[in-house]
Structure formats: structure tokens, C-alpha cells
Image (cartoon, grey):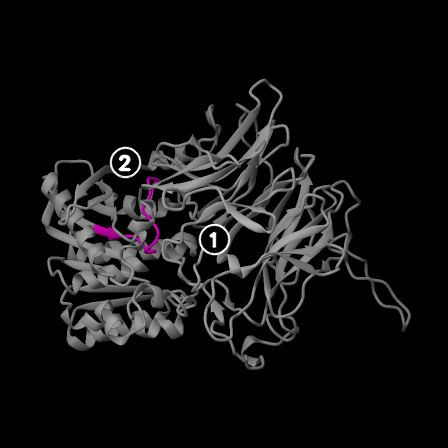
């Protein structure tokens, strides 16, 4: 594929399944170059073998949830002001009805058990900020007083002046009379002109104050809503959370699980019998023991959590991981060796595999059915030749969104595992263009570090292969999907065994395949991959060029600038000056002679722009060939969810850099 083919990358979100399993509803999303944004709609497919049909025609419809009786679909869509609101429509199709009018938009939501109302979270801006006063520009707002250890978040901005709160609102009838624009009329001096109504009901705010609330899940009887408060710490970061139940009648809240359990919560589910299940990670007594955190499935019993899965062998921490109830059991996603498989877990802790192979499960749903099979499970998956499909477990795919991608050309990488210099196995992939070669080689390094390369069709690799480069990429020590010991092995020693692993995998790949030209090699990576790229080129000078993107480059300044700086560096590189310097790319930048392109986003609050500008300036001052590319309006997620035009311009810059420093024949 080429850079402009990113519009063929159709992803499939978490599906919703009818209570009787007869149909599924799901959302798709893809980059659109003309609209310069990600676009997508809802789809419906009859099961087990129907053809999918488009259910909505919005710009970016997402997050579908079926009402408990399966007759109504709720979903998220931007309103006329660009704020995300809950909308509803008949499950068979029809005109959507707007259900909420949250000034800053809805973040998360849930149906009540009786289908009569929604619970949702939404940010509440401080008076005078974020457009709450007509005509008041951000530059004219009052100063922000900051007293806590964190104040901003990547992709959002400032935190404390717009806490997220919990609301309830009645669900509108999908067949009700629409609202109309009031016509102009002559009115008396005391008579106010009627305003056009947007929604049928008024929302009731259930929480208040400076704390934010994340997630909304009704209890079985509908009288309470489970949610996780987020309090900005005054002195030191604490990742441990509390799980609370907020009364729907406004009578306050109660604590379900407190911080004494040391858990950070990722997902909450209430099973049909009322049992509370959570995916959560143990943050330890320090509250920040987050490296390879060991997300597990827990049940809340008698006011305490009981763990069902072993975090040392099962990793439930994949982004978007969630729980589905199926009878007395639960479905969860396990990240392993570049795959994400679907597991079934009993309440006794027995684990079986439901869906595995060359897939990455992104979402799932399940239902009991009456056709003799007993149950139906659907999953959204990515695969080597597709960015996203909906599959029925046991029956196979019911969509083929990857067909267009396959027409533009997808190279299937070869999976390999090589022993490193200390005998440790290093697992990864090699993607090679068609032909005999020899081809110049690019070593790619993923972010995280507790993340992983996977088996899905990856545009970053495919575009390079199309341009004539062999691409080598692996999951070195520090990565996810190989057990907690693997993930925690670089704690306090970044740039050691992880350096060895990526270099040893590269050397083994070149030695094994004559099509790879080991004399013509480049290196690139983003985030932690930017860190390791910068570290490698300070210690290994074989590379014709390097691309350091959105990198963690100076741990000393990261602490006071990054949205995770209050704990990330403390755990990974330590707090002592000597330890930080021993693992800092900035401390060894003087050794770099490799021509380097530094790429960063202007609004990156995860690895702030100063990380790039200081590194680039150091390269220039010492005479190392260097260029810098800064993307306006983008954050840390540029390569995944940035403006499509910027993504294309980024690819153009990448290919231009390599053509100048590592030309293909």
C-alpha cells in the first residue's frame, strides 16, 4: 500500500448483539482524505450469515449500544456544535433522535436495565472557559490556579477546570413528534420568543465538585451507577482508584472498593445476576507500580476483590479491553505474542480459549440463543490482511472490509524468533518487497515500552515495503504479550537488554536472508521507539539515517512537562541524577553522528515538544546533520488518529528522508 491508501484502513469497533443473538450492530471508522478526518457509520448484520447494511449516514457515528429489549440502538454522534451526544434510532433503521445536549459533549454512557434512561459522563467547564461565555476567547480567560501534581492530559488539555461528572437523563421515544424551528412573530414587550428544543428531557447531574468521574454502569436493579472517581493529587501521583456506587435518586454515593486494594480500574461490568466484575491492575503499595501492571479479571465479593486470572500468564491490558458476560462466565481479551485472543473465564477461574490464531480482537459481545447452539459470540478483529472485520465465533467473518485494502497490495510479514546474545529469544517480523533484492533495511521500534507490534495490517510497515525497503521489527524485552517478567525487565535499565534485543534481531534477520542488505540500514521509532532509536544511534554508528519521532528523550525534563511525568520516569529510569543520566538519550547526544530527522506534534502532552526541540538543537549545535518536522494541531496520536492530510504529509517526509539517506535502487 501507498500513503494515500490509508483510506482503505477500515477498523471495526466493539459490537452490540441483540438479546436473542439474531443481529449485531457495530461501527466502522477510517481516515478520509477529502474530509480530512476519520469517518464512520453504524452497520447492522443479521446472524449468523447475513450481509451487513449501513444503518446510519453520519460523519463519525460510534459506540453503539442496544437497549435491553434490543429494539433501540443508542450511539454517539456530534451535534451541530461539534459536541458528541447520545442519539437513538430504531434497531431496524430510521432517523436518529438526539437524546442529550451536554455543553462539552458526552464521554461514556450506559442504558438503564429497564431501558428507560441513560447514565452518562460529561465534562463540566468552569464558568467563563471553553466557550461557556459567548465571545470570550481563550486568550482572555482568567489565569488557572494549579495546586496538584498534574494539570493536563494528552489529547485533552487542561484538566482541573472541566471535571467530568455523572448525569442521568430519560431516553427519548424514537417515534415521537420532532422539534421544529419557531417561526418569527411579533410579541409583546414582556413575551420571550420560544427557543428551539433539541432534546426531549433535561439531564440530572448526580455528582459535583473538583473530582472527575470515569465510566457509568448501572447496578442490576437500576438504583445505582458504578463509576470511578479521579481526584487530582496534591503532593504525589497515586494510580490506585476507588469504585463507587452513586444513587440515581441523588441520595449520594457509597464506596464499593477502596484504595486499600491497590487497584487501577480499566473496565466495569454488572452480570445479569448482579455480580460486579472488573478488569483492574494492582498498582502496589506505592500506588505507581504500573510497569507491566498485570491487568486481571476480578469479582467483587463481600466488599473485596477476588482475582480470577493470573496476570503473569494472561495479559488483559490491551487498549480497549473489556468484559462480556455469558451465562455465569465472562469473555475477556488476552494480549500474547502479537495477537489478542478471546478467552472465556469461569467464576472458579478456569480459562478456555474462544478465538485465537492470527487475529487481534478489538471488541466482543455474546448472547444466549434458541436455535440449538445455545449461545452466540461475535468479535471485532484485525488480521494480517485486514484492519477490521466482524466475525461470528465458530462461523467466521460476516464482513469483508479488508477487500479494498487487499486490492492496493498488502505484504504479509514473515514471523521469526531469534536467540539474542545472551540466549534470550527475541520475537518479531520481517517484511520484504517482491523481488530478489538486495533491499535496504529499516529497523522499526514500537512505542510503549509496554506495548507490542502485532499481526494486523500495519500501514507504517506496508508503505515502506511498497517503497522498496525491507522492514525488520520485533518486541524486545520491555514489550507486552510475553509475560510480566519480560515487560518489567527494563525497569531501571532502559537501553540495555532492549537495545541488545532489537540489534540482535536485526543482525539475525540480515544474516538469514540474502535479500536484506546489511550494509544499507536505517532506524526509526516513535515515543519509546523514539527513545530507543536515539539511544541506539548514540552507541551504534552503522545506520545511514534515523527518524526520532515523538520521543521520550530527556527524562530529567520529562518529569515537569509530560502529562505522565509525575510517575513514568520515576518508575522506568529512577529519580537519582546518575541513574537518569545513565539512561538518557540527551546525556549521550554528543555521540550521535547519524543524520537524524526529528518529528513531533505541537500539542503532544505525552512526550512534550520540548523533548524534540532540545534534542534537535543539541544535534545542530554539535554539527550532526539534522532536520525537524513539527505538526500543528496534532498530539501524541498523530500516526493513529491524526488528520489524514497530516498523516500523508508525514509519510511523504519519511519517504523523502529515506530516499535521500537510504535510496532504493
Q: Earlier in the sequence, mark 2 or mark 1?
A: 1
Q: Is residue 585 magenta?
A: no
Q: Which residue is mark 1?
A: 37
Instruction: Estimate the x, y position of residue 657 in percent, counting from the top left.
Output: 22, 58
Tag 1: Cα neighbours inside 10 Å, few (<14), some, or many (≥20)?
some
Query: Depth-wise, is mark 2 or mark 1 nearer the camera?
Result: 2
Q: Which mark is residue 412?
A: 2
Which residue appears at 54% of the width and 80% of the height?
A: 145
Indicate whether 559 appears above or below 221. below
| Res 530 quadrant in image | bottom left
Q: Of residues 46 and 401, which is closer to you in this image?
A: 46
Using the numbered discs, state the Cα–Cα distance from disc 2 to disc 1 in whole angstroms: 28 Å
Q: What range is drawn magenta here?
A: 443-457
Taking the image as shown, residue 328 lies to the left or right of residue 583, namely: right
Q: Does residue 336 appear in the picture of this structure?
A: yes
Instruction: Estimate the x, y position of residue 618 in percent, counting from the top left.
Output: 22, 75
Q: Main secondary structure of the magenta part?
A: loop
Instruction: Estimate the x, y position of residue 152 in percent, counting from the top left.
Output: 48, 69
Indicate whether 456 appears above or below 659. above
Taking the image as shown, residue 563 lies to the left or right of residue 182, namely: left
As helix, strand or loop, the secondary structure at mark 1 comes to: strand
Taking the image as shown, residue 576 lies to the left or right of residue 191, namely: left
As helix, strand or loop, the secondary structure at mark 2 comes to: loop
Which residue appears at 31% of the width and 46% of the height?
A: 453
Indicate whether 364 appears above or below 303. above
Instruction: Estimate the x, y position of residue 664 in percent, counting from the top left.
Output: 15, 48
Taking the image as shown, residue 90 lies to the left or right of residue 346, namely: right
How many callouts does the rendering have? 2
Q: Which mark is residue 322?
A: none
Q: Of residues 33 and 314, which is closer to you in this image?
A: 314
Q: Is residue 450 magenta?
A: yes
Q: Does residue 36 appear in the picture of this structure?
A: no
Amino acid at each position: 500500500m501507498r500513503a494515500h491508501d490509508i483510506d482503505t484502513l477500515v477498523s471495526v469497533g466493539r459490537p452490540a448483539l441483540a438479546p436473542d443473538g439474531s443481529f449485531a450492530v457495530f461501527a466502522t471508522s477510517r481516515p478520509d482524505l477529502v474530509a480530512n478526518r476519520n469517518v464512520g457509520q453504524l452497520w447492522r448484520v443479521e446472524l449468523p450469515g447475513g450481509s451487513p447494511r449501513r444503518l446510519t449516514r453520519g460523519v463519525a457515528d460510534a459506540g453503539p449500544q442496544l437497549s435491553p429489549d434490543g429494539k433501540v440502538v443508542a450511539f454517539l454522534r456530534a451535534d451541530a456544535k461539534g459536541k458528541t451526544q447520545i442519539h437513538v434510532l430504531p434497531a431496524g433503521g430510521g432517523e436518529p433522535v438526539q437524546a442529550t445536549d451536554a455543553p462539552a459533549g458526552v464521554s461514556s454512557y450506559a442504558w438503564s436495565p429497564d431501558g428507560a434512561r441513560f447514565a452518562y459522563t460529561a465534562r463540566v467547564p468552569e464558568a467563563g472557559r471553553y466557550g461557556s461565555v459567548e465571545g470570550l476567547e481563550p486568550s482572555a480567560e482568567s489565569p488557572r490556579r494549579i495546586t496538584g501534581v498534574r494539570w493536563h492530559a494528552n489529547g485533552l488539555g487542561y484538566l482541573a477546570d472541566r471535571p467530568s461528572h455523572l448525569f442521568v437523563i430519560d431516553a427519548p421515544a424514537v417515534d415521537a413528534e420532532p422539534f421544529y424551528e419557531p417561526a418569527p412573530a411579533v410579541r409583546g414587550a414582556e413575551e420571550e420568543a420560544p427557543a428551539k428544543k433539541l432534546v426531549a428531557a433535561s439531564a440530572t447531574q448526580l455528582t459535583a465538585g473538583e473530582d472527575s468521574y470515569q465510566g457509568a454502569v448501572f447496578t442490576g436493579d437500576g438504583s445505582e451507577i458504578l463509576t470511578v472517581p479521579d481526584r487530582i493529587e496534591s503532593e504525589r501521583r497515586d494510580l490506585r482508584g476507588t469504585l463507587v456506587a452513586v444513587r440515581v435518586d441523588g441520595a449520594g454515593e457509597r464506596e464499593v472498593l477502596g484504595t486499600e486494594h491497590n487497584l487501577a480500574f480499566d473496565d466495569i461490568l454488572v452480570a445479569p445476576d448482579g455480580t460486579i466484575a472488573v478488569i483492574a491492575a494492582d498498582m502496589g503499595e506505592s500506588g505507581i507500580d504500573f510497569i507491566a501492571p498485570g491487568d486481571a479479571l476480578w469479582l467483587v465479593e463481600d466488599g473485596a476483590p477476588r482475582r480470577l486470572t493470573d496476570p503473569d500468564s494472561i495479559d488483559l491490558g490491551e487498549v480497549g479491553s473489556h468484559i462480556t458476560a455469558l451465562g455465569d462466565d465472562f469473555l475477556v481479551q488476552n494480549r500474547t505474542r502479537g495477537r489478542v485472543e478471546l478467552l472465556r473465564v469461569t467464576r472458579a477461574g478456569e480459562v478456555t480459549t474462544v478465538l485465537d490464531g492470527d487475529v487481534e480482537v478489538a471488541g466482543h459481545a455474546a448472547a444466549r440463543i434458541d436455535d440449538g447452539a445455545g449461545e452466540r459470540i461475535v468479535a471485532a478483529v484485525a488480521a494480517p490482511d485486514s484492519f477490521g472485520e466482524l466475525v461470528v465465533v465458530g462461523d467466521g467473518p460476516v464482513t469483508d472490509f479488508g477487500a479494498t485494502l487487499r486490492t492496493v497490495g498488502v505484504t504479509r510479514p514473515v514471523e521469526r524468533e531469534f536467540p539474542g546474545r545472551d540466549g534470550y529469544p527475541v520475537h518479531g517480523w520481517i517484511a520484504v518487497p517482491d523481488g530478489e533484492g538486495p533491499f535496504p533495511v529499516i529497523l522499526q521500534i514500537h512505542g510503549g515500552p509496554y506495548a507490542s507490534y502485532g499481526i494486523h495490517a500495519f500501514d507504517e510497515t506496508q508503505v515502506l515495503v511498497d517503497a522498496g525497503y525491507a522492514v525488520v521489527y520485533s518486541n524486545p524485552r520491555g514489550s507486552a504479550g510475553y509475560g510480566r517478567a519480560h515487560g518489567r525487565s527494563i525497569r531501571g535499565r532502559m537501553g540495555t537488554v532492549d537495545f541488545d534485543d532489537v540489534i540482535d534481531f536485526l543482525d539475525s534477520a540480515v544474516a538469514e536472508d540474502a535479500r536484506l542488505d546489511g550494509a544499507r540500514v536505517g532506524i526509526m521509532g516513535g515515543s519509546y521507539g523514539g527513545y530507543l532509536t536515539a539511544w541506539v544511534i548514540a552507541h551504534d554508528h552503522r545506520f545511514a539515517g534515523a527518524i526520532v519521532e515523538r520521543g521520550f528523550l530527556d527524562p530529567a525534563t520529562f518529569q515537569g512537562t509530560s502529562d505522565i511525568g509525575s510517575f513514568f520516569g520515576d518508575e522506568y529510569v529512577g529519580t537519582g541524577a546518575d541513574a537518569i543520566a545513565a539512561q538518557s538519550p540527551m546525556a549521550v547526544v554528543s555521540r550521535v553522528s547519524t543524520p537524524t530527522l526529528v518529528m513531533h506534534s505541537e500539542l503532544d502532552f505525552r512526550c512534550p515538544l520540548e523533548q524534540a526541540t532540545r534534542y534537535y538543537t543539541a544535534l545542530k549545535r554539535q554539527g550532526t546533520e539534522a532536520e525537524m518536522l513539527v505538526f500543528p494541531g496534532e498530539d501524541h496520536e498523530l500516526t493513529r488518529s491524526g488528520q489524514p492530510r497530516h498523516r500523508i504529509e508525514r509519510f511523504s517526509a519519511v519517504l523523502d528522508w529515506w530516499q535521500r539517506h537510504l535510496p532504493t535502487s
